[in-house]
Amino acid sequence: MIAGASTSAGRRPWTTLRLPEPGQGFVHARGDVFETTDPATGEVVATLASSTVEDVDGAVGAAAHAFETSNWASNGELRAHVLYGFAQSLRAEQDRLAELLTREQGKTIHEARIEIRSSAKMVEYYAGLSRLVYGRSAVLGAEVQGVILREPVGVVAVITPWNWPLILLVRSLAPALAAGNATVVKPASLTPAITLEALALLASQPGLPEGILTCVLGSGGVVGEALVGHDGIGMIAFTGETATGIRVMKRAAEGLRKVALELGGKAPNVVFADANLEKALAGAENAIFTTCGQICTAGSRLLVEDAVYDAFVERLAANTGGLRIGDGLDESTQLGPVASAAQRVKVLDYVERGKAEGTLVAGGTVLEGASYDAGHFVSPAVFADLPADSSLIRDEIFGPVLTVQRFADEAEAVALANDSEYGLAAGLWTQNLDRAWRVGRAIRAGTIWINTYHHFYDEAEVGGFKRSGIGRQQGIEGLHEFTETKHLNFDGKATLW
Ligand code: NAD
């Protein structure tokens, strides 16, 4: 039994949202009704209509019309103004949005506030870049000039997952809009209410041409498929599982649509004996337990050097056992529920496999207590002594399950770190500067954190090597992903050749 916070004490009653509300004309959804529920209590959070295939058609058509007829693509000042206004609204509504995010997704309220604030910051960053969408010029001969322009792609589909539903929305939506595109958003079915509430703030910004922002709701299998296969879509910005990303890319290929894919991960987190071990311990815990392990960059493979292995793992186990698991709305909670019943079943299945294949070092127990009965709570689990081909080491579990492996030297650490089909992120902990550079260069992943973990910056690109994705988001490259380049070539000579 792990120390548990009460899941219901101090909870305010919740009024179920009914979305879309009148005036939310950007939402194209006239199909069957579905509900979202609170993963901590089972309480209904929102009742929504899903989109039909005709709604998808309507949303894409509205976006295409707005792209062709409005001044959005040509007016950077307007785009900056709208995005700044959106960022301000997110800040002003932080408390309401954070509560909704926790109720719908399950994450701790502390993390929910960080997500809203970080989203506002990222929107501001791209608001600034709205006025910096430019290419370059080239002198190509005595009387020959070239201007290389950056132009928006057209209509961009933005498809998001449920784990960080707001930041992963704006990470694609804000640069897509900043570059002058029209957009059709499809949020994950577990977290549409928080997405819609945030989008309503954007939709209400003065000056945003009708149709530049549209939204469809519903399952990936029907609504997502219709969207990625639609001929009116010029680009798909997809964040989700690798298997789904491959499916999306195949559908996109049928119409030769551009894709940006942010996919799964299985990040190694490497602790050398010469690290600041206090900091590394806190970093290892943050790396795996943030969002209850449901984060693409989760440091789910901990690699520890022989000389400090036993002492490090012992302390990690003690800290894991002391985590306060409970309702994310309780300020003292450190680990909320996982986001759905299906996710809980998946995590528990891996825990059982881990018990059969290796040594359970911490957690992995049955959570007892009435407060856990209605929610999707799982006890975090740390495993050691697993065979190298164990599915716990190879698969992205997307839950609070950590594997620990031992290494003898730097070469073995790098080999173990790279022994994965994924390459999204990695952490390394050492006070040896030469080693930090060497190992950082040798690990094949899009982000390498040295003596830190899970720090993201709007200015710094993220993305995946190997099966973790295609393209980059955030930073200037994140803006350029949503553009096409065009060479305007002018020849002033009297004769052609
Ligand atoms: P998912 O792939 O199941 O779903 C993602 C989105 O795609 C949802 O909106 C879903 O409805 C939609 N979708 C599903 N099938 C589709 C189809 N055939 N066509 C079009 N759309 C479809 O992923 P998830 O379970 O929501 O999220 C978890 C996954 O996302 C994990 O693998 C995680 O690593 C990944 N992720 C990656 C990043 C990153 O930056 N690389 C960030 C967050 C999450």
Image (cartoon, rainbow, N blue to C red):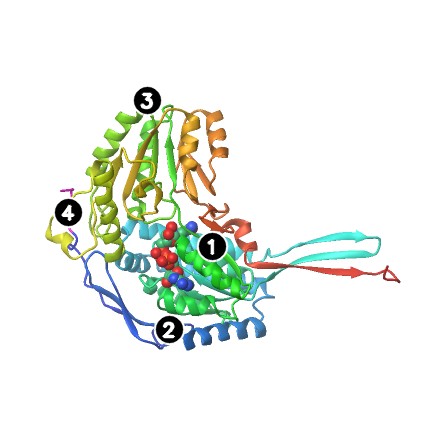
Residue highlighted by disc 4: 367
Q: Earlier in the sequence, mark 2 or mark 1?
A: 2
**Mark 3: amino acid:** Ala
Tell me the residue at 39%/46% (across/down): 265
Separation of residues labelled 2 and 1 (CA atoms)? 23 Å
Residue 85 rendering spot, x and y as whole percentages: 46, 62
Q: Earlier in the sequence, mark 4 or mark 2?
A: 2
Separation of residues labelled 1 and 4 (CA atoms)? 37 Å
Q: Is residue 164 among the parts visible in the rendering?
A: no
Seen in the picture, residue 316 relative to 91 is either above or below; the reply is: above
**Is residue 2 a member of the stretch shown in magenta?**
yes
Looking at the image, residue 2 sits to the left or right of residue 477; the answer is: left
Q: Provide the residue span drawn in magenta.
A: 1-6
Tag 1, which secondary structure? strand
Residue 415: image quadrant is: top left
**Mark 1: amino acid:** Leu
Q: Earlier in the sequence, mark 2 or mark 3?
A: 2
The quarter in which the N terminus is drawn is top left
Which label sits on residue 51?
2
The quadrant of the picture showing ligand 1 is: bottom left
Q: Earlier in the sequence, mark 3 or mark 4?
A: 3
Which label sits on residue 307?
3
Residue 282 or residue 302, whichever sits in front? 302
Query: Badge 4: how crowded within 10 Å, few (<14), some, or many (20+)?
Result: some
**Mark 2: amino acid:** Ser
Q: Earlier in the sequence, mark 1 or mark 4?
A: 1
Residue 252 or residue 183, whichever sits in front? 252
Separation of residues labelled 2 and 3 (CA atoms)? 57 Å
Seen in the picture, residue 153 relative to 275 is either above or below; the reply is: below
